[in-house]
Amino acid sequence: MTVKKTEAEKPADAPAKIDPATTVDAAGAPQQIVPDVDLSHPAVDDNPRAGTISEQNKIDFNDPTLSGQEAVEKNLADQAE
């Protein structure tokens, strides 16, 4: 008889069983459900944009083909149009 081990009982180097992401968030990050993350823990920021205004969220630094300076310059130029 084979007994299935829970994630907590598996060796630390055993692969996690986390399903691939099927959606992405507004910033383009893949959204995966990670069963063992307690989003209410003080060390986890479950709402990193809380308290920000729309102006703070306009510039997108996620273009890997641009440096940070190029991203800022591009976004400022786009706003001037």
Image (cartoon, rainbow, N blue to C red):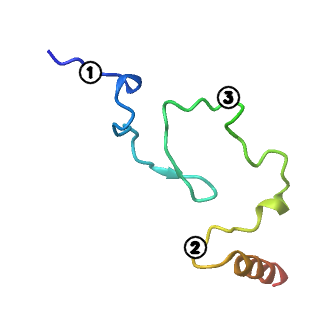
* Residue 17 shown left or right of residue 58 in the figure: left
* Residue matched to label 1: 4
Label 2 Cα crowd, 10 Å radius (few <14 / some 14-19 / many 20+): few
At a point 81% along the width and 84% down the height, the residue shown is 81
At a point 82% along the width and 61% down the height, the residue shown is 56
Q: Please, what is the three-letter code of the amino acid marked with disc 2?
A: Pro
Residue 64, numbered label: 2
> Helix, strand or loop at disc 2?
loop
> Helix, strand or loop at disc 1?
loop
Q: Please, what is the three-letter code of the amino acid marked with disc 1?
A: Lys
Which residue is nearer to you in this view: 76 or 4? 4
Q: Are marks 1 and 3 in contact (CB under 8 Å)?
A: no
Of the image marks 1 and 3, the number of the one nearer the N terminus: 1
Residue lying at the far front in this picture: please name it: 12
* Residue matched to label 3: 40
- Whole-Å distance between the Cαs marked 2 and 1? 42 Å
Q: Quadrant of the N terminus?
A: top left
Which residue is nearer to you in this view: 52 or 36? 36
Label 1 Cα crowd, 10 Å radius (few <14 / some 14-19 / many 20+): few
* Residue 55 shown left or right of residue 64 in the figure: right
